Image (spheres, rainbow, N blue to C red):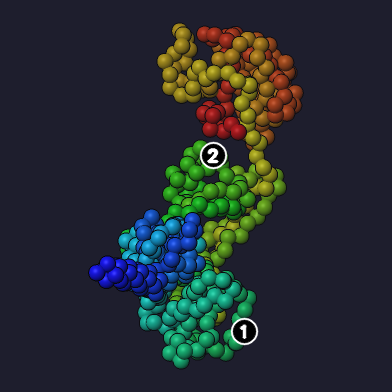
Amino acid sequence: MNYLTRYHKALAYTRMKTEAMIVILALFLLPGFTPWKGGQENVFEVMVSGQTVGRLRNPDQAREILRQAHLNAAKDCEGILLTDPSLYVEPRVDDFAHFTDPEEMQRNMEQVLKDSAINTDKPAYSVKVGQTMVNVKTLDNARDVLQAAINVYQEKEDFKVQLVPDSGRQINVLTADTVSAEAAAKDEKAVLTVGSGEGIDPENTDGISGGVGFDAFDYGLKDLRFAGKVEVVESYLSEDQLSDSDQALQMLTVPMQEQKIYKVQPGDTLSEIAIDTQTPLDTLIALNESLEDENSTIKADQELIITSPVPPLSIDREEEQYYEEDYEAEIEYIYNDDWYTTDKEVRQAPSAGHRKVAAKKLYRNDKELETQILMQEVTYPAVPKIVEVGTKVPPTYIKPISGGRISSPFGRRKAPKKGASTYHKGIDWATPVGTAVVASSGGVVERAGWGSGYGYVVYISHADGRQTRYGHLSKVLVKPGERVSQGQKIALSGNTGRSTGPHIHFELLINGTAVDPLKYLN
């Protein structure tokens, strides 16, 4: 009995050992299990953007799985997936480590990327003209907008917009050119030069002979092109950054005021410049410090700031036209070296002529830039306007003292003391007695001494026929008949004559009439 008991116990023990060995062996043979190696990391937990996506045996796999996940996530978006995922692999020690299938981990990563996407933009196209850029949804939209811009200047679509790759650029950029409709229909590559700026040669009359009649010309639109470089760039933009075709066309073609420099020509007047340059007269005066009002003097070659309405996208075109017109001959000038540039006199009045004309005209938008007359038949000739103008620069005028405070301006005023005039013919600057008084402009001293109400006074006559007067002086430093230069010291200020305090009284007379000196001082 004791023997059997010992046998059964031994058998049970052997069975237990066998079962334990089977369990251990099974654990080692199970997929996804790594045996524990005392004290060594045997599992790597993978996190993307702070979220756990699974475990790997080999940490080097994580980056490749993330790359593929990012590609797949981007494919599901209409545009570009904007995200910056962070990848973190943390080593761990786990006695019974289980691992994530790579495909499952990739799916987990894709979901994290989609959930953490910052923004999704859509493919779009930007039309760039100078500093102006408009964004539209498709390439066809860009082409349609540019076509609509040139269609304003053609009755039929004789010219079409063509977008061609810019071989000189590294990024995907298209350049907008114009091509004849016939060439476009044939899909030809002969594209007209954009913005060549060659214009019309007024001396070029090749092919035109005296025996050719007006009916021999083929009138109409000859060339149509963009005045500057137009680029179309592929981009990715959000919906709120896009414009529809009408909005884009308006942004490109509505004129904006642009400042330019205009050089004054002989015979110009401010009113004529304002009309010719489409700059309102008050705007012209406000833009130029040298202009006080509409009566300000201007001289040839003087530079003035003007404004001109210019759209971002300008269109150049050439047309051959037949017309009959009354025309004016160019003004002829006689230059007189003894006259000032402010002096002019009409020597011959103009008379319009009449002619028949075949001409080639160059336009930029609606403005005519050049005209080349190909043929003309004069019915009766125009008589030119002949104007005599001066060439000498007229004298300038400066303030007669340094500093000082205006105490009485030019014009109507309340009499400062009994016997004083209520119409002030000059301007007063309050200044201490003894302040240096200088000649406002070069000239000849006509009077120097006591002048009753003026106290001590100096009169100076100038080469342009004007006269300046300096009153209430304390001391006179020049004599009648003496020639003085601009800025030369002629007297000391004072408080003599009919005066209410130390000051200098200054007058400027033109043709014997006092004017406001401030309008003429440089």
Q: Residue at x 50, y 73 (%)?
A: 172
Kind of element beneath mark 2: loop
Say above or below: 457 vs 62.
above
Q: Nearer the viewer, residue 87 or 496?
A: 87
Residue type, mark 1 in image: Asp
Question: What is the crowding at mark 2: few (fewer than 14 residues within 10 Å), some, or many (at least 20)?
Answer: few
Q: Residue at x 70, y 29 (%)?
A: 486
Q: Nearer the viewer, residue 34 or 53?
A: 34
Disc 2: which residue:
289
| Left or right of residue 106: residue 273 | right
Mark 2 to mark 1 CA distance (whole Å) = 48 Å
Kind of element beneath mark 1: loop
Can you give x and y, in whole percent of width and height, for residue 239 in the image? 32, 63
Residue type, mark 2 in image: Glu
Q: Residue at x 68, y 22 (%)?
A: 438
Q: Which mark is residue 117?
A: none
* The image quarter in which residue 449 lies: top right
Residue 368 visible in the current orientation? no
Disc 1: which residue:
206
**Residue furthest bottom as drawn:** 186
